[in-house]
Amino acid sequence: MSTVNLTTDTFEETVTGNDIVLVDWWADWCGPCKMFAPVYEKAAGTHEDVVFAKVDTEAQQALAAGAQITSIPTIMAFKDGVLVFRQAGALPARDLESVIDQVKNLDMDDVRARMAEQQTQQA
C-alpha cells in the first residue's frame, strides 16, 4: 500500500476510520525527513493492514499547529482513533517495525481503561 497525503479535511476521518494509522509529519526542506521517507515507504509496502499517511507541514500549517508539531519528522501512531505513539526524529527501519508491531499488539480495552483512570485522577 502506498502512503496517503492528509489535509485538514481528511485527517480526522482517516485517523478515526481505520484500525491503525501511522502519520509522518514532514517538510520538503527537511533533510532527516528525506532520509526517513524511503524507510517509511518500504514499511508501507509490507503492512497492508496499516494506513501510512503523510502530512506536509508546510502545506498544512494549521493542521501541524493543531497537532503541536514542533520538530520534524514526527511520527504518530493511532489505533482505533486513539493516539498511542508520538516521537520526533527519524526512526531506523528496525525501530519503525518495532513500533508497528507494538501498536498492532496493543490491547485497546486496557489502553482505554488506563485513560479513563487518568482522567478520573485528574478530575
Image: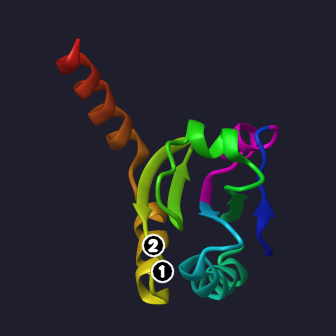
Q: In which quarter of the image is the C terminus?
A: top left
Q: Distance between the residues labelled 1 and 2?
A: 6 Å
Residue 42 is tagged as none
Residue reaching furthest top?
123
**Mark 1 residue type:** Glu
Q: Is residue 17 magenta?
A: yes
The residue tagged 2 is 101
Question: SS of the residue at dot 2?
Answer: helix
Magenta stretch, residue numbers: 9-22
Q: Cβ–Cβ below 8 Å for labels 1 and 2?
A: yes
Question: SS of the residue at dot 1?
Answer: helix
Question: Quadrant location of residue 9?
Answer: top right
Residue 97 is tagged as 1
**Mark 2 residue type:** Asp
Q: Position of residue 59 (x, y in %)?
A: 78, 53
Q: In this view, does 67 lie to the left or right of 6?
A: left
Q: Is residue 62 left or right of residue 98?
A: right
Question: Quadrant location of residue 20?
Answer: bottom right
**Residue at 80% across, 43% down:** 10
Q: Does the magenta stretch include residue 104?
A: no
**Residue at 43% across, 88% down:** 94
Note whether 94 is above or below 64 in the view shown.
Answer: below
Mark 1 or mark 2, whichever is nearer to me = 1
Note whether 50 is above or below 119 in the view shown.
Answer: below
Looking at the rendered structure, the number of numbered marks drawn on it comes to 2
